Amino acid sequence: MDNAGYITLSRQGGLQREMQAIANNIANISTTGFRKEGLVFAEHIFATDSQEPSLSMATANVRATIQTQGPMTQTGGVYDFAIEGEGFFLLETADGQSLTRAGSFTPNQAGELVNPDGYALLDNGGSRIFVPPNAQSINLAPDGTLSADGVPLSQIGLYMPVDGNPLSRQNGVKFTVDGELETAENAVLLQGFLESSNVNAITEIARMIEVQRAYELGQTFLEKEDERVRGVLQTLGK
């Protein structure tokens, strides 16, 4: 295969991975706390011998999480919390600590606040949050202070990666950070709300059509290039 074919194949591979990311975004339009994912395209230049110019190919292996605010949905749930601004809830999982924007919690049998997967929500000191089983009213202040019957229990921790430390998506709406965390200073917590997915259906469908057309154009080019090469070989073979 000549250089034009290799270049087109590298682009096709990136477009295919981007299509998968878009399809995953669309599938999670209704997922609470979901963060849209995109692909970063870059140019990779290969050096050739002195008689030939360098060869430039497209790479798209880096996934980027889009951190725009999702719309707020009012639920009225006592243990439904939403973050307005930057930051993530911190969860204690079997594989270590994870970050999430999905704020649906409930007390487990021990009275600890956990998410639907059973992972414990942590406070600003990294400890689990306990709610008395006989509490008549639970209130959450904008700064994350959780109170039962007017008595402060704990302050929910909101964290974000230190600059330069990238987020890695585990699965669904959970993330890990390669590096240290810092406190999210300007975030506000809302009780009785959940943050919806930040995926815009119209934008994603339009992008899917655009990527699909680009992929089809690349496929047509490869087919034409294959026909050209076959024609040359047949001519030379006569």
Image (cartoon, rainbow, N blue to C red):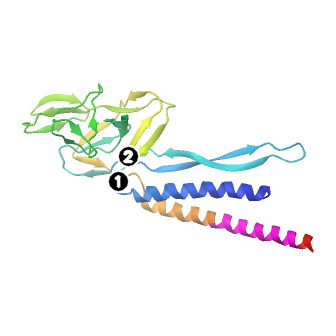
As helix, strand or loop, the secondary structure at mark 1 comes to: loop
Please identify the quarter of the rendering in which residue 186 is found.
top left
Residue 155 percent across, percent down from the top left? 24, 29
Q: Which residue sits furthest top? A: 125
As helix, strand or loop, the secondary structure at mark 2 comes to: loop
Question: Which image quarter holds the N terminus?
Answer: bottom right
> Left or right of 157: which side holds 49?
right
Which mark, residue 173?
A: 2
Against 60, residue 123 (above or below) is above
> Left or right of 217: which side holds 170?
left
Against 142, residue 194 (above or below) is below
In the image, the segment drawn in magenta is 216-234
Identity, as a three-letter code, of the amino acid under mark 2: Val
Residue 100 percent across, percent down from the top left? 35, 41
The foreground one among 118 and 161 is 118
Please say whether residue 232 is one of the residues in the magenta stretch: yes
Which residue has dot 1 on it?
Answer: 31
Residue at 44%, 43% in the rendered image: 169
Q: Assess whether mark 2 and mark 1 are in contact (beta carbons under 8 angstroms).
A: yes
Residue at 36%, 29% in the rendered image: 185
Q: Which residue sits furthest front? A: 237
Residue 29 percent across, percent down from the top left? 38, 57
